[in-house]
Each structure stands twice: as C-alpha cells, then as structure tokens.
Amino acid sequence: MEQYPSRILEEAVNELSRLPGIGRKGALRLALHLLKQNPADVQRLGNAVIQLRSSVVYCQQCHNISENSLCAICTNPRRDNSVICVVQDIRDVMAIENTAQFNGMYHVLGGIISPMDGIGPSQLNIDSLVEKTTNGIINEVIMALSATMEGDTTVFYISKRLKDADVKITILARGVAIGGELEFADEVTLGRSLINRVPYENTLVK
C-alpha cells in the first residue's frame, strides 16, 4: 500500500489514475508535475476540463460532439446532405475532416458491434441512421468503419437494416489496411480510400 504525505495528493492520484492509459505511477507523476506549475495554469486546466464536461454535448442529428444542439457540420449549408459517412466515433470524424476530401454529412455510431465486449446493435446509434434514409434526401451511405472483424460485422448488419432503403451503400477502398484502425491511417491513404470507395455489395462473397 502506497503511503502519501498528503491526503489531497492521494485523492488527486486516485482520480487521475481513473483516466484511460494512466496507472497510479503515471498519475503520481502528473500530480507532482501540476504541483510545480503556476496556479493560474492549473486553474485554466481545471476550468477547461469542467467546461468540457458541462458545455459539450452530442449533436442531435449526427451524434458528433458540439457546443449546440446541432454541430457545425450539420448546420453548414455548403455540405452535401445527400451523402452520409458512417463512422465509429468522433475521432474518425476528425481524421476524415483532416483529409479535406469529403464534403458530406456524418453519422457517429458511438462504437461497433462487439459481442466479446458486450456491445450489441441496440447500444449503437443505428436506428437513427435507418430513420435518416427514409427522408428521400439521402442517396449514398458510406461505411467508413475500421477494417476489422468487428467493423465488417457492423457494416454487414447495417447493410441488412438498409436493404429496403433506396440508397447506395459504399465502403472505403481497402487502401486502409485490413485490421487497421481508421484513426491511425495517414491522411493521404484515408483521403484516397474515400475517393475510391466501392459499392458494398461488390465486396460480399457470392
């Protein structure tokens, strides 16, 4: 059992160690680092974290993060609202936006189907995606999910849900490595994969 010279320090370590990828030793290093900083700098950090949690919400239309009920992408009149790019999470939206190769809309699932992790279709934003395709505006749904078993399973499930919708379903060209996570693909590869996307039905084993 680690002994701390201060209860406040111990509480800070306990909270920091709850962050993903940070163990107790790393949390202690962070806490000691903060103690050495200017109080005003630490105050700004604390305020930024509090504001992040209290002021940032999810877009009601695409589930991207936003400071308003609709995000900046959904309210941008220059975006093509006939094309929806389906992604796993917000990091993928950021990765695709950085390519400057896509001018449509997004739909963030909030994860992918993974029975091993206890994540099923009902826990993802799939119903709202299916509902979008009934408005007569959407003509293409791009499945921009990671080329993993879980990603492919999710694409297959969604394609079945959309089989009666009058939309074209495409997936990224396999310039994105099989088994690779979308957020780690370089911008050139990801951009080319978007441009060279292919109909999903062409990828199915007959």
Image (cartoon, grey):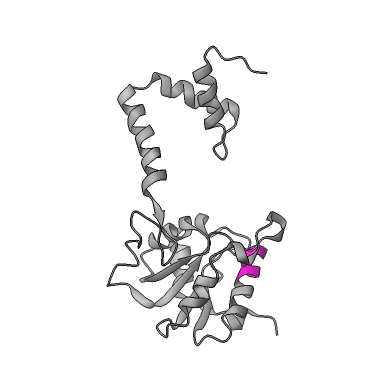
Say which of 107 and 130 sits in front.
130
- Locate the C terminus by quadrant: bottom right
Residue at 35% from the left image edge and 60% from the top image edge: 69
In the rendered structure, does residue 150 fall within the stretch colored magenta? yes
Indicate the position of residue 62 as horizontal and vertical percent values: 43, 66
Magenta part, dominant SS: helix
- In the displayed structure, does residue 191 sit left or right of residue 179? left
Q: Which residues are magenta?
A: 147-154
In the rendered structure, does residue 85 fall within the stretch colored magenta? no
Say which of 103 and 130 sits in front.
130
- In which image quadrant can residue 157 be found? bottom right
Say which of 17 and 70 sits in front.
70
Residue at 40% from the left image edge and 83% from the top image edge: 137
Q: Is residue 137 above or below residue 175?
A: below
Whether residue 97 can be seen here: yes
Q: Is residue 16 above or below residue 59?
A: above
Q: Is residue 138 above or below residue 73?
A: below
Outermost residue on the top side: it is: 5
Whether residue 197 can be seen here: no
Indicate the position of residue 22 as horizontal and vertical percent values: 56, 34
Outermost residue on the left side: it is: 77
Residue at 62% from the left image edge and 66% from the top image edge: 121
- Locate the N terminus by quadrant: top right
